Amino acid sequence: MADIKNQKADVGNKESKRQRRAGMYSEQQREKTLMIVTPIVSVLLALIVGAIIIACMGKSPIEGYGAMISGALGDAGKLGKTLERACPLIFTSLAAVFAYKCGVFNLGGEGQFIMGACATATVILGLGLDGFPALLLGLLAGIVVGGIWALLPGIMKITRGLNEMITTIMLNYVALYFMEYIFKNVFSDQGLPKTLAMPKASHLVDVGTAHAGVIIAIALGVILWYVIFRTSFGFKIRAVGMSPTASKVNGFPVRLLMLAAFVISGAIAGLGGAVELLGKTPFRLAGGFGSGFGFDGVAIALIAQLNPIASIVVALLFGILSTGGTMMQSVIGVPTAIVDIIRGLIIIFAVAGMAMVKLPKVKAFIASLSNKNKKAEVTA
């Protein structure tokens, strides 16, 4: 009799464990589904609100969005322009993704992007390089200086406990004024506020209607996804981002990993600056170079739920909005500010949606809906 009771108890324990595992699996599936659905719903809501605004102006939203798609993807030339517009956003969003995965908030992507371009210009123009060596050393200089520029707030954080959001934003302004010094004084083109153009032989080659930097950006996104989610180094980075204390208890070098996240993040942004300088007309530094790319990259990373592949997709969406907005303006006569409104709404809806689905009451409501659906399937 005792053996029978023990067997029943073992069966009951196994069944309860199986149910707990099934519950955890279903919860993980719900979270993954919400991570995909939330950005999509955010984009749709932003487009709907944008359509309402266009309609209130007495214009046709359907015609306007049709013109936007045509202006961004209508032919090979327009597609290439869209990809080139998205390229710097891919780099800065990937930089933000990698840093945020380690729990460090690098808001200095724009400064690192600019410093990478400044380093590229300095190496090529200062050393008088040309051809493939200029291209190779220029890209390498962008990577190294971008990483060093991000290293500074990293050191300040782990040694003095300074808030990296403040220090990286402050360094953005330092980079901006340093670039101004470069194009107004050091390498000014006959006294004009712009540098000399990069030698033609040092430009990135064109692949179809876009420069090769687009392929570099997309390949980097795929590599970054593999590193973050499929390697032990990526696991340590994510572990530190989730809980630095637990990571330290388990023997992970938390400070070193945070510093590495800063450096790699800055190197990615610096490479983006070098690619933008050597891949896109006018191939020179001037006022406004890199403006807005850093904070747009942060927004894209958040919309993409800190997923490198999703960041590429969202950056392409932003590229479509940017390129197609001009065509929409010329066809239906609405200001291009409509595009900025839509982009802002996408960010607002995405961030608000992510915060909302993490609320306990919302989680419980979604779980109850899922349980009702399962019961209905079982009854059927």
Image (tube, rainbow, N blue to C red):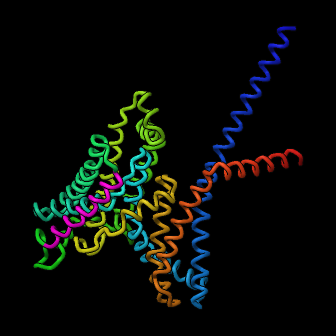
Residue 227 in picture, x, y percent from top left: 42, 43
Above or below — where is 144 with respect to 233? below
Report whether residue 231 is seen. Answer: no
Q: Residue placed at 13% from the left, 73% from the top?
A: 188
Residue 57 in picture, x, y percent from top left: 57, 89
Q: Nearer the viewer, residue 7 or 103?
A: 103
Q: Quadrant of residue 136?
A: bottom left
Total labels drawn: 0
Q: Main secondary structure of the magenta part?
A: helix
Q: Residue placed at 11% from the left, 78% from the top?
A: 191
Residue 66 placement, left or right of 194: right
Task: Check the picture and name the quadrant holding the N terminus.
Answer: top right
Q: Residue placed at 63% from the left, 43% from the top?
A: 28
Above or below — where is 22 with respect to 173? above
Q: Quadrant of residue 77?
A: bottom left
Residue 294 placement, left or right of 120: right
| Residue range corresponding to the magenta coloring | 164-184
In the rendered structure, does residue 303 fall within the stretch colored magenta? no
In the rendered structure, does residue 180 fall within the stretch colored magenta? yes
Q: Quadrant of residue 8?
A: top right
Residue 91 in picture, x, y percent from top left: 37, 59
Q: Nearer the viewer, residue 147 or 177?
A: 177
Report whether residue 359 is seen. Answer: yes
Q: Residue placed at 42% from the left, 49% from the top?
A: 100
Above or below — where is 194 with respect to 26? below
Residue 370 placement, left or right of 325: right
